[in-house]
């Protein structure tokens, strides 16, 4: 069965609650495409107003992060039950900014993936290499290690429902996109790794996004590749151009 494309915005630390609602309203009629699942991953403080603002539309809401405990003395953190109660469906796990600035390692990210599944959230698990790793041709081993560590203990049935985002760090926020062939190569490799870890049916079902300076100009070519099932979009998710990415096939 063909995999449905999934285009998710990663708003990062942008948009106050009132700006967030304004953006949702601006995008409302632009992000309708029956061939595509659309997700807005928004800052924690924007979740409640954004869930309200997308009500009745085709857009699902995601969080950018969460913590592995349900409640307690974890000042500043937000839990899976809190997200679910607010209407969140997806959660980004292991974005390179969290790995780098907040020192989240694969051991913690694996716990987050397991916790997301146990709670009923769909993980968007990010992986990707630095420029240094790409230049010394070590990127494939690196990404495979990330995938294997982050998915330890996750079942095939769970993997079939999740999203993996391949995001080369050198392409995030830099305006430098991986070529469609470079992105396809890695997304195909990730699918192959999933087939080895699980089975062909699981590899065929899991949706793999590309992320890294995807925009209205390059989305169609990237999304035409057989193993690229969508995009995780940073900068361009904050503009009306996001609607053009969602409608890449029109
Ligand atoms: C991201 O941070 O997930 C991302 C892909 O950002 P950008 O599109 O701005 O490169």
Image (cartoon, grey):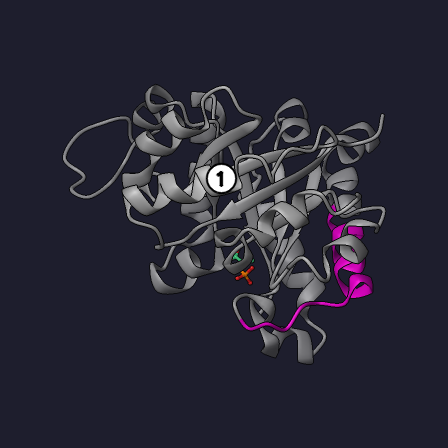
Within-10-Å neighbours for mark 1: few <14, some 14–19, many 20+: many
Residue 99 seen in the figure: yes
Quadrant into which the N terminus falls: top right
The rendered magenta stretch, by its main secondary structure, is classed as helix
**Considering depth in this image, is 115 or 107 the residue closer to the camera?**
115
Q: Secondary structure at mark 1?
A: strand
Residue 132 lies, with reference to residue 95, above or below; the image says below
Q: Is residue 77 left or right of residue 140?
A: left
Q: Write down the quadrant of residue 191 in the picture.
A: top right
The residue under the point 64% across, 27% down is: 161
Residue 114 counted in the magenta span: no
- Range shown magenta: 174-190
Residue pointed to by mark 1: 40
Instruction: Give the residue drawn at x 33%, y 19%.
Output: 85
Residue 113 x %, y %: 49, 36
Where residue 79 sits in the image (x, y, percent)? Answer: 30, 31
Q: Relative to 12, does residue 31 appear above or below in the rendering? A: above
Q: Quadrant of residue 215?
A: bottom right
Q: Nearer the viewer, residue 36 or 153?
A: 36
Residue 188 part of the magenta-drawn span = yes
Q: Is residue 131 above or below residue 159?
A: below
Q: Nearer the viewer, residue 191 or 19?
A: 19
Residue 36: horizontal and vertical position, in percent?
69, 34
In percent of width and height, residue 202 lies at 75, 30
- Residue appearing at x 63%, y 62% in the figure: 142
130, above or below 97, in the image = below
Judge left or right: residue 122 versus residue 147. Answer: left
Residue 183 versus residue 107: which sits nearer the camera? 183
Q: Quadrant of ligand 1?
A: bottom right
């Amino acid at each position: 069965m063909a995999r449905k494309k999934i285009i998710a915005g990663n708003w990062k630390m942008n948009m106050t609650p009132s700006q967030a609602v304004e953006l949702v309203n601006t995008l409302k009629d632009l992000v309708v495409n029956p061939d595509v699942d659309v997700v807005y991953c928004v800052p924690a403080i924007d979740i409640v107003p954004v869930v309200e603002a997308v009500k009745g539309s085709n857009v699902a809401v995601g969080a950018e992060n969460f913590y592995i405990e349900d409640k307690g003395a974890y000042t500043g953190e937000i839990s899976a039950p809190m997200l679910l109660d607010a209407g969140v469906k997806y959660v980004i796990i292991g974005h390179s900014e969290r790995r780098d600035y907040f020192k989240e390692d694969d051991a913690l990210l694996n716990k987050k993936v397991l916790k997301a599944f146990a709670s009923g959230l769909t993980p968007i698990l990010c992986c990707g290499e630095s420029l240094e790793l790409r230049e010394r041709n070590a990127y494939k081993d690196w990404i495979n290690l990330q995938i294997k560590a982050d998915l330890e203990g996750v079942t095939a049935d769970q993997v079939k429902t999740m999203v993996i985002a391949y995001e080369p760090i050198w392409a995030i926020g830099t305006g430098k996109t991986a070529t469609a062939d470079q992105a396809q190569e890695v997304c195909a490799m990730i699918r192959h790794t999933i087939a080895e870890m699980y089975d062909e049916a699981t590899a065929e079902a899991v949706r793999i996004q590309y992320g890294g300076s995807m925009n209205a100009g390059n989305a169609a070519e990237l999304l035409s590749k057989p193993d690229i099932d969508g995009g995780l979009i940073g900068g361009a998710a904050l503009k009306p151009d996001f609607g053009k990415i969602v409608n890449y096939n029109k």
